[in-house]
Image (cartoon, rainbow, N blue to C red):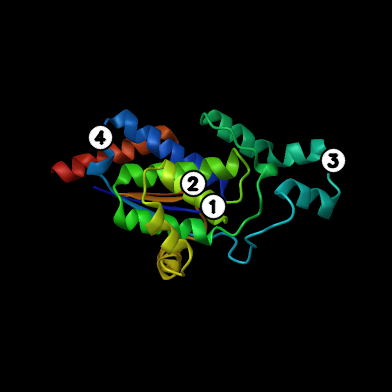
Amino acid sequence: MRINFWMDYASPFCYIAFHRLNEAIKTVGIDQNKLEYNFCTFQIAPTATENPRLTRGEMLTQKYGLTKQQLYERFQNITEQARDAGLTIDYADTLPINTMKALRLTKWSNDTQVNQKTAKLIDGIFVAYFVESQNIASDNVLLKIVNDAGLDASSAKKILTSEEYRDVVIEDEDNLANRNVDAVPYFEIGRYHYEGVPTKEDLIEAINNLIYQKAN
């Protein structure tokens, strides 16, 4: 039973969608390791630096002269959607970071590890970025998340200090473009295709339909 989920760590909507996917799987009650997860990658800002000096909020304030209230209002929709999903996202405090390293690490885990460990890695990176405002282009930050997820840190370090899996990330992006889709999050769950953030109920229905198709 295959689930394709295109995502980027720079997108708060991908974090919300990933969380809802996990909640839907728990509600359905199916073992994650009986699913064929394919966590696909799509880099939203490939030209972003790995060491930005300013947070997203600071950058916008400097560029447009926004007040704190105006900054709050600009990100209010993201904050409210996250809260409705049971998450806390401090989008203004995030760094406009290059996510290639984190995405390459995700593809390595997706290819070599069990689903639950990969899901834990992804959640850890999202939390580090959106909740803790950490630099997820930092090897030290990523390796700590790897260790916390129960993955092999020495293997992960080899990935991070090379260009391995870069071509896989780009291939994922090309595959999405071939579907005439240019934004994430994006889901393919059996016959269910969805661009944007689906409801938990929609995901439950899609997973149940996938189980039914597999059984018949």
First in sequence, mark 4 or 1: give its number: 4
The residue that mark 3 highlights is 67
Say if mark 2 contacts mark 1, CB within 8 Å: yes
Query: What label does residue 30 carry, if any?
Result: 4
Q: Earlier in the sequence, mark 4 or mark 3?
A: 4
In the rendered image, the vertical position of residue 85 relative to residue 96, given as above or below: above
Q: Whole-percent x and y of residue 73? A: 74, 37
Q: Are marks 3 and 1 in contact (CB under 8 Å)?
A: no
Whether the residues at callouts 2 and 3 have beta carbons within 8 Å, the answer is no
Q: Residue at x 38, y 37 (%)?
A: 22
Task: Give the number of the disc on residue 144.
Answer: 2
Q: Check residue 132 in the rendering and tell me which mark sits there, or answer none.
A: none
Instruction: Indicate the secondary structure of the residue bearing disc 1.
Output: helix
Q: Earlier in the sequence, mark 4 or mark 2?
A: 4
The Cα–Cα distance between marks 2 and 1, rounded to whole angstroms, is 6 Å
Question: Looking at the image, which is closer to me, 147 or 171?
Answer: 147
Q: Earlier in the sequence, mark 2 or mark 3?
A: 3
> How would you rate the neighbour count of disc 4 (Cα within 10 Å): few for under 14, some for 14-19, many for 20 or more?
some
Q: Measuring from the top left, give residue 67's x and y in whole percent.
A: 84, 40
Circle 4 — which element? Answer: loop
Task: Give, as a three-letter code, the residue at label 4.
Answer: Ile
Q: Nearer the viewer, residue 134 or 156?
A: 156
Instruction: Calculate the distance from the C-alpha at mark 4 to the C-alpha at mark 1.
Output: 34 Å
Q: Which numbered disc flags the more N-terminal residue, 3 or 1? A: 3
Distance from Cα at disc 3 to Cα at disc 1:
34 Å
Q: Which mark is residue 140?
A: 1
Tell me the CA gap for discs 4 and 3.
47 Å
For badge 3, the amino acid type reads Thr
* Image quarter of the C terminus: top left
Asked whether, in this view, residue 99 is left or right of residue 170, the answer is: right
